[in-house]
Amino acid sequence: MSCPSLTQRISQLKKERNAVIVAHNYQAGEVQDVADFLGDSLAMSKYAVNSQAQVIVVCGVHFMAESTSLLNPDKTVLVPDLSAGCSLAESINAEQLKQWKTEHPGAAVVSYINTTAEVKAQSDICCTSSNAVRVVESLPPDQEILFLPDMFLGNWVRAQTLRDIKLWNGSCHTHVRIRPEPILELKKLHPNAEFLMHPECGCSTALMHTADHILSTDGILKRARASESKEFIIGTENGILHRLEKENPQKKFYPATQGATCEFMKKNTLEKLLWSLEDMQYPVRVPETIAVKARAALERMMRLS
Ligand code: 13P
């Protein structure tokens, strides 16, 4: 239960600062409950672009704030905790990408949005889990593609598109904890449950054909709302359960793995959010030399959605 004085102070400061709070679907419930907007990576970026607010507090992980800042160069973008990183974004740096490109001259680079601005700046186009197939299909059919950094998402996109995709060997440390065995057990216990899986899941290669739907976090939320099913097995970070349960009180949601909690996503708390608005901390801004190229890769993706 959140403390009323904290939430009241946050809402008062939001007005004073002309600020909005944009939160990812994996945030702690107390943070989700004070957000002006909740969404997946793509929806967060779109919302920020269309917002009239001058200050955008991004409750998610660092690359989400960087993307928001890249797409909103005239706005102040803040994060409540600068150490909220992302294991996927850490799994490849600009030097490694440069080297990979020299091994595949002529290949197009498709970077998942879970990358640093330096890596985006070396990429042709970005994608998120909700548009990765569309992004790859927008490239010429015989184009060799370097897909990074998530091998599970990349493998799923390759299976959907049958394109010549080379995969970087990266993964999300939380999604790799989601293994096939407990899911097969849950399916036996709840035979009528729909299985909704995020493409970053470590089980995605083995269970791709058994999932009812492979979706982004917003896709999972949308499907749960629209489906006639009363029970669901959810294969993604468990922060999403807060919103799933709140929006569908009559339905049951079983996490594929109890341990699928991202400690970086949970670094943002109500207190840190309040301090962020009080002290205008911590601003995220990408140096312009990198921003120009990184923005181009992001905007190419945004034009497709
Ligand atoms: P979505 O874009 O599906 O919300 O995924 C973001 C993410 O970081 C998953 O780990």
Image: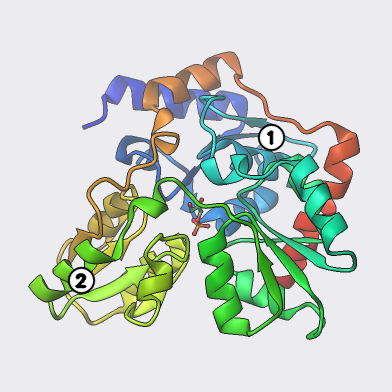
Q: Quadrant of the N terminus?
A: top left
Q: Is residue 243 left or right of residue 11?
A: left
As displayed, is residue 285 above or below residue 211? above
Q: Position of residue 261 (x, y in %)?
A: 33, 43
User: Visible in this render: residue 44?
Assistant: yes
As displayed, is residue 225 above or below residue 127? below
> Nearest the camera: 98 or 252?
98
> Nearest the camera: 156 or 2?
156
Q: Is residue 252 left or right of residue 304?
A: left
The residue pinned by badge 2 equals 184
| Dot 2 amino acid type | Leu
> Nearest the camera: 157 or 227?
157
Q: Position of residue 193 (x, y in %)?
A: 19, 75
| Dot 1 amino acid type | Gln
Q: Nearer the viewer, mark 1 or mark 2?
A: 2
Total count of labels: 2
How far apart, in angstroms, are the residues tagged by discs 1 and 2? 48 Å
Rendered residue at 28%/50% (across/down): 242
Q: What SS does tag 2 mark?
A: helix
The residue pinned by badge 1 equals 54
Q: Position of residue 13 (x, y in %)?
A: 51, 23
